[in-house]
Amino acid sequence: MLALLVVLWGSAFGLTEIALRLFSPLQIVTGRLWIGALVLLSLLVVSGQGLPRSWRTWGYFLSMSVFGNVLPFYLISWGQQAIPSGLTGILMAVMPLVVLVLAHFLVPGEKLNTPKIIGFVMGFCGIVLLTGPSALAGLGGNPAEIIAQFSVLAGAVCYGLNLIIARRGPRLPPQVTAGCVLLGSALLSAAASIAQGDPLPGSLDLAPTAALLSLGLLSTGLATVVYYRVVARAGATFLSLINYLIPVFAVLAGVVFLGEEMTTRAVLALVVILSGILVSRRRETSGGAA
């Protein structure tokens, strides 16, 4: 399931690039959220599953809508306008560290231990190796670049917080949680789009429209269901490792679909990243939780 999520989220970058030919960033965010929400809510109606009525439960959903979708989508997209993708990948790789620390204090059974720390360090080193150590040279810079870097970091922290909220939230079927969270996200994003006065395009071109539909159906709808299923089964710390795998998928996709060269550095980075994930999942002999 983690591998499927990597493909669904990893392909979103290319789909977004195509959709940007016609739609604004906020329109893409709003469109993909509404498509995903409508699909999942339709499935709930067909399966006969009702929506929760507890205000506390909907409070969790609203929190996950803000920190898991709307806020990080905007913060990262805004930041990427001023910094290169390699540096963005490195900044996003801090999310597992955020989750490790928060889960230690807030999630039962996910205490910080030596394998988790070693796995995080190995994964982070793999990201730096994959994107190229020169990407670290982009840290700092002029005030606009520094603000953009903090914006991406804030998006990574939002994702980390959302994992903790999801782990501590009510135990519901993943499709129920996914549908409700996407509905809340879609409503918030639509309100932001209306407030901004973002005009819709006059006509719909095939490629950008198909890309937006794919973003909604696959990278948002299906991915959200898988996301909450993985959180429920394997925990927040394990899922946070996805930030290491998405760059790996991007490299492999470039080789398969774009004919790019698989360098020795990329192969080595892949080995380091996957090894870090394996190490982080080991249980300590003293009985610590993995």
Image (cartoon, helix red, strand yellow):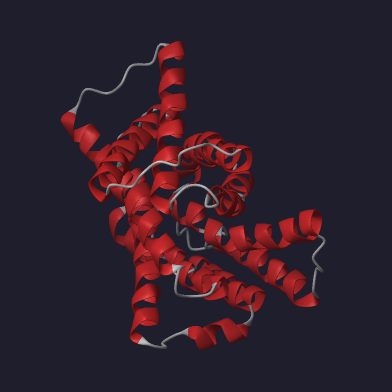
Give the left or right position of residue 191, taking residue 38 as reference: left
Image-quadrant location for residue 152? bottom left
- Residue 184 visible in the displayed image: yes
Rendering coords of residue 155 (x, y %): 37, 62
Q: Nearer the viewer, residue 65 or 237?
A: 65
Q: Nearer the viewer, residue 117 or 212?
A: 212
Rendering coords of residue 196 (x, y %): 27, 50
Residue at figure coordinates x 46%, y 33% from the top left: 36
Rendering coords of residue 52 (x, y %): 27, 23
- What is the residue that sits farthest to the left in this orientation? 55
Residue at figure coordinates x 45%, y 64% from the top left: 96
Residue at figure coordinates x 52%, y 52% from the top left: 20
- What is the residue that sits farthest to the front in this orientation? 202
Please give the count of numbered marks on the rendered protein: 0
Give the left or right position of residue 259, taking residue 153 as reference: right
Q: Nearer the viewer, residue 121 or 52?
A: 52
